Image: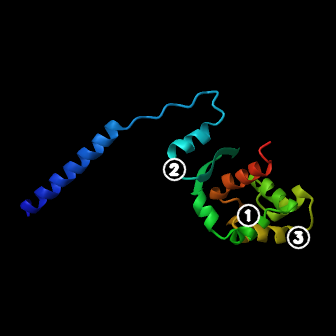
Amino acid sequence: MQNDAEPRLRALEERVAALEDRLAGASVPPAPAADDVFWVLNGIRDRYPDSGVVLFAGKAAVGPGERYEYQYGLETAHLLDVDWTAYAETLASLGNPVRLSILRAVLGGTETVAQLVEELGAGTAGQIYHHVNQLLAQGWLAAHARSRYRIPAPRVIPLLAILTAATGGN
């Protein structure tokens, strides 16, 4: 039994030594210059020198104790290969002023349809439920308690990124 353990131990020691060597040789990238307006883009170029990539990231504090951090990206080649029409319903669910108002209110702490009706003044409870159900179906809202809704954490930064993109970069 001991003879079997010695080669395994030696192999593990070699692997640990190799990892330590790699860590010792790794350098910390310099911090971006304070006046570098393209610091994110320059970081992408450094990390992905040969391929195209699109990503978004964000850090948001939207309410007391509510903090979100998220990043996501895909290679451009993948984005150009997928069927964009598969995302039509998800995007269309955001293309309604009442639904955007619902999402904004929910992000601000409104949780129930009754509160939404009162806050938005945009229709009856039945009409608001219709819009809430559309947002639920596409994952922009989730029930977190009986008749209470919130935006799922992994959707907060993507929603804000879509709104940022909708400003046209201006």
Q: Quadrant of residue 116?
A: bottom right
Q: Which of the two labelled residues, at mark 1 and mark 2, occupies the earlier sequence position?
A: 2
* Label 2 – label 3 distance at C-alpha: 50 Å
Q: Residues within 10 Å of mark 3 (few under 14, many from 20)?
A: some
Q: Is residue 63 visible?
A: no
The residue shown at (73%, 64%) is 148
Q: Residues within 10 Å of mark 1 (few under 14, many from 20)?
A: some
Residue lying furthest front: 50
Q: Position of residue 130 (x, y in %)?
A: 83, 72
* Label 1 – label 2 distance at C-alpha: 46 Å
Q: Please report contact status of discs 1 and 2: CB closer than 8 Å, yes or no.
A: no
Q: Nearer the viewer, mark 1 or mark 2?
A: 2
Q: Amino acid at mark 1?
A: Arg
Q: Is residue 21 left or right of residue 56?
A: left
Q: Amino acid at mark 3?
A: Gln
Q: Which of the two labelled residues, at mark 3 and mark 1, occupies the earlier sequence position?
A: 3
Q: Nearer the viewer, mark 3 or mark 1?
A: 3
Q: Quadrant of the C terminus?
A: top right
The residue shown at (61%, 40%) is 40
Q: Which mark is residue 127?
A: 3
Please name the residue that numbered disc 2 is placed on.
50
Q: Is residue 81 above or below residue 66?
A: below
Q: Secondary structure at mark 2?
A: loop
* Observer-nearest of 40 and 48: 48
Q: Secondary structure at mark 1?
A: strand
Q: Which mark is residue 65?
A: none
Q: Is residue 25 above or below residue 138?
A: above
Q: Nearer the viewer, mark 2 or mark 3?
A: 2
Please name the residue that numbered disc 1 is placed on.
148
Q: Amino acid at mark 2?
A: Asp
